[in-house]
Image (cartoon, grey):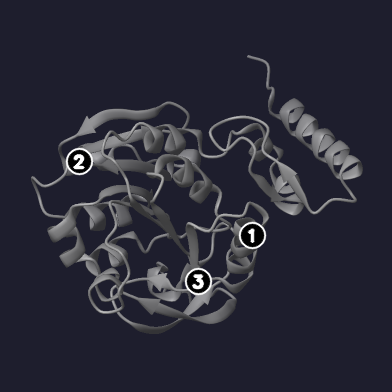
């Protein structure tokens, strides 16, 4: 079989170079296709991955979100990065609904707020905290790219070998809803680089009382097992999300969930719980 990877890489580099030259005098670019068509994104983000402009960012998760039958009035984007899936949620929520986007990294948070302003989204609120199992402060460990930072508590080695980006605020989901007046969510997307179970541990009362739909990106089998163990049995229907195909087969056993994981692009998996 012919190896097409070098060709794909060369084409991406060429496309990025052409895009960089042709847009050097603008700060934002429009998304040209997909559910977020018409929204604008920072030029730097488009240059990092031109597929964003073609509506091909997280296609599986996007299909899963748009396919949710339950009406959504309040959606939480936990680990929002710069807000690309928040744009999808804006299209999904009811006309009087709200998206609350949580992003602890100060650089990403600034880009998230720029995205909200560039698209005039008064129903999207950016919150600069990390959801976890406790309220307080914690070190945020910078990853290889802006997509991969994590709180120190989530690291396999406690983050001791990684460069410390900053000290950030943490809060539990329960404290936000029941003590600080945040609206109870109908939907929560969680993409927090290994802190998935910590978010759920801090939101047990919210989950019990409101049963929000959950879309969770699982980072490796250890964290996937922790998520499976922390959620009550029999409350949710679990489904795997295909990277490009959206909602997939039902998951009924822990071993079935863990079997999805492997090396390379199989290290992260997404699931929808309804």
Q: Position of residue 87 (x, y in %)?
A: 53, 46
Is residue 39 found left or right of 48 in the rendered image? left
Determine the CA span between mark 2 and mark 3: 33 Å
Q: Is residue 78 visible?
A: no
Q: Position of residue 77 (x, y in %)?
A: 42, 56
- Residue 104: which numbered mark, if any? 3
- Residue 117: which numbered mark, if any? 1
Label 1 packing within 10 angstroms: few (<14), some (14-19), many (20+): few
Label 3 packing within 10 angstroms: few (<14), some (14-19), many (20+): many
In front here: 55 or 148?
55
**In which quarter of the view is residue 274 placed?**
top left
Label 2 packing within 10 angstroms: few (<14), some (14-19), many (20+): few
Q: Residue at x 33, y 82 (%)?
A: 135
In front here: 98 or 16?
98
Residue labelled with disc 2: 255
Question: Which tag, 1 or 2, sits closer to the chain's start?
Answer: 1
């Amino acid at each position: 079989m012919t190896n097409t990877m070098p060709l794909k890489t060369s084409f991406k580099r060429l496309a990025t170079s052409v895009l960089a030259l042709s847009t050097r005098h603008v700060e934002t670019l429009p998304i040209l296709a997909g559910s977020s068509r018409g929204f604008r994104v920072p030029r730097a983000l488009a240059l990092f991955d031109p597929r964003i402009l073609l509506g091909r960012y997280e296609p599986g998760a996007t299909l899963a979100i748009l396919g949710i039958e339950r009406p959504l009035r309040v959606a939480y984007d936990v680990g929002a990065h710069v807000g690309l899936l928040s744009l999808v949620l804006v299209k999904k929520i009811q006309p009087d609904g709200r998206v609350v986007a949580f992003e602890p990294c100060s650089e990403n948070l600034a880009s998230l707020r720029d995205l909200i302003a560039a698209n005039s989204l008064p129903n999207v609120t950016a919150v600069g905290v990390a959801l976890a199992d406790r309220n307080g402060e914690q070190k945020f460990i910078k990853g290889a790219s802006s997509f991969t930072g994590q709180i120190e508590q989530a690291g396999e080695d406690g983050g001791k070998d990684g460069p410390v980006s900053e000290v950030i605020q943490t809060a539990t989901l329960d404290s936000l809803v029941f003590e600080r007046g945040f609206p109870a969510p109908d939907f929560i997307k969680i993409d927090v680089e290994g802190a998935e179970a910590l978010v759920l541990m801090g939101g047990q009362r919210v989950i019990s009382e409101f049963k929000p739909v959950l879309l969770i990106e699982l980072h490796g089998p250890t964290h996937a097992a922790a998520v499976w163990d922390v959620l009550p049995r029999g409350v949710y229907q679990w489904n795997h999300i295909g990277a490009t195909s959206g909602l997939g087969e039902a998951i009924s056993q822990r071993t079935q969930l863990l079997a999805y994981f492997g090396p390379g692009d199989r290290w992260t998996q997404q699931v929808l719980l309804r």
